[in-house]
Amino acid sequence: MNLQEIQTELRAEKLDGWLFYDHHRRDPIAARILGPGDGGMNTRRWFYLIPARGEPRKLVHRIESRALDHLPGKKTVYSGRDELESGLKKTLGAAKKVAMQYSPRNEIFYVSMVDAGTVELVRGLKCRVVSSADLVQRFEASWTPAQADSHRAAGVLVDQITQAAFRRAADFVRERRPLTEYDLVQWMVGEFRAKGLEAEDGPNVSIGPSSGDPHYEPRAGSSRPIREGELMLLDVWAKLARPDTVYYDITWMGYFGATVPDRYAKIFAVVREARDAAVAFVQKNVRAGRPIAGFQVDRVAREVIRKAGYAKNFVHRTGHSIGRDVHGAGANMDDLEIHDVRRILPHTCFSIEPGIYYPEFGIRTEVNVYVDERDAGTTGAEQREILPLLA
């Protein structure tokens, strides 16, 4: 935790403080920004206030009184509910406006970690609660140089494994050996381990109708066989298997034939154009020093698909924040599921992944975009056409 930087940002945002709250480790954002502590029990409620000026203040239960000992600040302890409320009032002090992991109407649900009752409790003490979404993006979603390096290193390996998976599947099809979506997933997971990568779950291998489900997951005993004449989508994400690294997340497509059918090629050209338009929009504005928000990027990609006549078939946001979780805590490229007004900040990364889906197939392309102080760009290979895997 960089206390001085957080307090500088609080003053810039005209906030009296940032109030953290947790029990049972329900707020991973708090652990990442403040530090995880000693890993002891966390069954009782605690509060930690970083004021815009002065020393932080903490409120902890007597039977877990050391819960926040790794953090600076004056400690108040409580046992009963009356002591909790009086202790929270003391912790807040003169603060009239604090940020918490809360989002009005649950709009930005990635930061909505505080329950409604706790927000009511704080408001009942005459303190206004606002969303910490922008603070979270600044202090959790922004990458260090080492994390950016880990992303690119993971990307090299993920790209290699993805292309090797296409080759392996093509070999099985040519030789008429049985191979299912799940079989290929398990082979890729083995390659992850061998190359020092890890992932929360996945990857996804989607054949034919499976690709029409954006979050399809192959399962043992029920996944589809990989055969000639089929379209295949690979959605692959991983990070280096060491502490404090960040994800790389891509989607590529192939067709098990010597040439790709015109219908698939035409739709891929539309999603590629939408992807490239969104990337160009980000690059142009970052280079010009103009602030942009996630919803604006989504609109750019969505307009390309709308003009091509596929608006109803683009059923998810254009992209998501990427960080230590594959779906990170920063701005999403989204004006569909939510209206994400968060500004795209330097040292953050996100996916651009427009898709067009039908019950019988789906087509998507995905790249990662990293933003630095004066520029932005993709961090890996960009697919230009569906791969003809039996050419």
Image (tube, grey):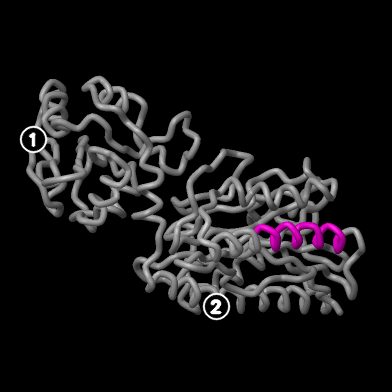
- Residue 208 image offset from top left, x and y in percent: 80, 56
Residue 87 lies left or right of residue 52; in this view the side is left
Residue type, mark 1 in image: Val
Residue under the point 40% across and 69% down: 147
Residue picked out by circle 1: 77
Residue under the point 23% across and 50% down: 7
Whole-number angstrom distance, CA of label 1 to CA of label 2: 49 Å
Residue type, mark 2 in image: Leu
Residue under the point 76% across and 63% down: 232
Within-10-Å neighbours for mark 2: few <14, some 14–19, many 20+ = some
- Residue 230 image offset from top left, x and y in percent: 84, 63
Residue 112 or 377: which is nearer the viewer?
377
Residue picked out by circle 2: 157
Assign a secondary structure to mark 2. helix
- Residue 356 image offset from top left, x and y in percent: 77, 51
Residue 230 or 355: which is nearer the viewer?
355
Extent of the magenta region: 264-278
Determine the image quadrant of residue 116.
top left
Does residue 272 belong to the magenta stretch?
yes
Assign a secondary structure to mark 1. strand
Q: Main secondary structure of the magenta part?
A: helix
